[in-house]
Amino acid sequence: MSPDAPVLVVTNLDDPTTDLVIGELHGRGVPVVRFDSGDFPATLSVEATITHAGVTGSLSTPTRTANLAHVRSLYYRRPSGFCFPSLDEQTARFAVTQARYGLGGILASLPGCLYVNHPHRIGDAEFKPSGLAAAVDAGFRVPATLVTSDPDAARAFVKNAAGPVIYKPLSAPLYRIDGVSCTVQVQEVTADQIDETVAGTVHLFQHAVDKTVDARVTVMGTNVFAVRIDSDLLDWRTDYTRLTYSVVTPPPSVTEALNAYLAHFGLVFGAFDFAVDRQGQWWFLECNPSGQWAWLEPETGLPMVAAMADLLERKNG
């Protein structure tokens, strides 16, 4: 790998995790080209030729230019998406589609590039039912789950459960109430709370794990960082001030399943969430292929920023 080969970083402007990783790469002398898809076409341009030799050409920002034939790796984080505010709605919709399939298709086809993760593989892995099915195949313990738009099926699932049942959103798009961003939280649900509005869309109901602690396991290539999260919360993500952290070692069966799960989706990074029950068994909840992780380093001392930089630098290959 040429020392001049850049790391492409695709994310929005406000991404502290990426800032840390880029700082580490800069300290190592590894060139980085950072951009957001929302920068196109105002301050981001691309020209690419596709021949029998593959993809050649360049991608340019106001301060950097990347040779598309010699990209070291691409760190796909959280871009804001294409936007054409100066165009009318129909024309903007056309332009967004062209940009997505044009620039997006080029970025997904870089020769010899390590993707962390490939945007198409991220898209596949973000479907919760697909993730749960893959988790079963990989060997994880997975709580019984119902995905339905049928109120009667939902009520029956709750009534027949041996313990509490929780509701989870299948995805978390931006949702505003009176101009304030809100989140649909994971919460327990009873049969009498389920009404006919369930028929309006698809919902996910899941048997609750009788947990004692949670665990976040972050995989970066061959590195596995497992952190025990203690709290009294159903969903620890609702209040970080009530959490305490400690480094933990996952059971060997969990480590094996991590690798199988990532291989299924073609991922090299994943942020896995588990609930650990009173018998010490680890239950798979989800894997975020673009999950947050940097806040855990100062809490635990785990060298996670360096590990991500190693992966993107391709230090081991």
Image: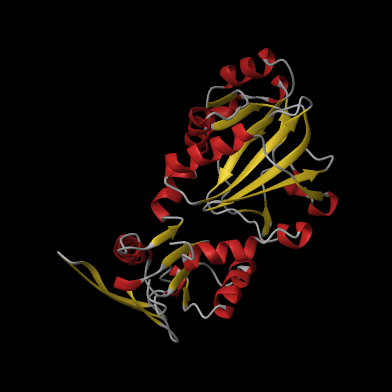
Rendering coords of residue 69 (x, y %): 29, 71
Q: Is residue 260 left or right of residue 89?
A: right
Q: Residue furthest front?
A: 316
Q: Quadrant of the N terminus?
A: bottom left
At a point 46% along the width and 55% down the height, the residue shown is 117
Q: Residue furthest left?
A: 52
Task: Compare residues 234 and 302 and report the one nearer the observer.
Answer: 302
Q: Work out whether residue 54 can be spotted.
A: yes
Rendering coords of residue 90 (x, y %): 33, 62
Task: Compare residues 153 and 291 and report the one nearer the observer.
Answer: 291
Q: Quadrant of residue 309?
A: bottom right
Where is 136 relative to 47, above or below?
above
Q: Work out whether residue 81 can be spotted.
A: no
Q: Is residue 50 left or right of residue 153?
A: left
Q: Quadrant of the C terminus?
A: bottom left
Task: Compare residues 100 and 71 and report the one nearer the observer.
Answer: 71
Rendering coords of residue 88 (x, y %): 37, 68
Rendering coords of residue 38 (x, y %): 46, 70
At a point 48% along the width and 33% down the height, the residue shown is 134
Instruction: State the colouring used for the structure image.
Output: secondary structure
Q: Is residue 50 left or right of residue 7?
A: left
At a point 32% along the width and 64% down the height, the residue shown is 110
Q: Residue furthest top?
A: 160
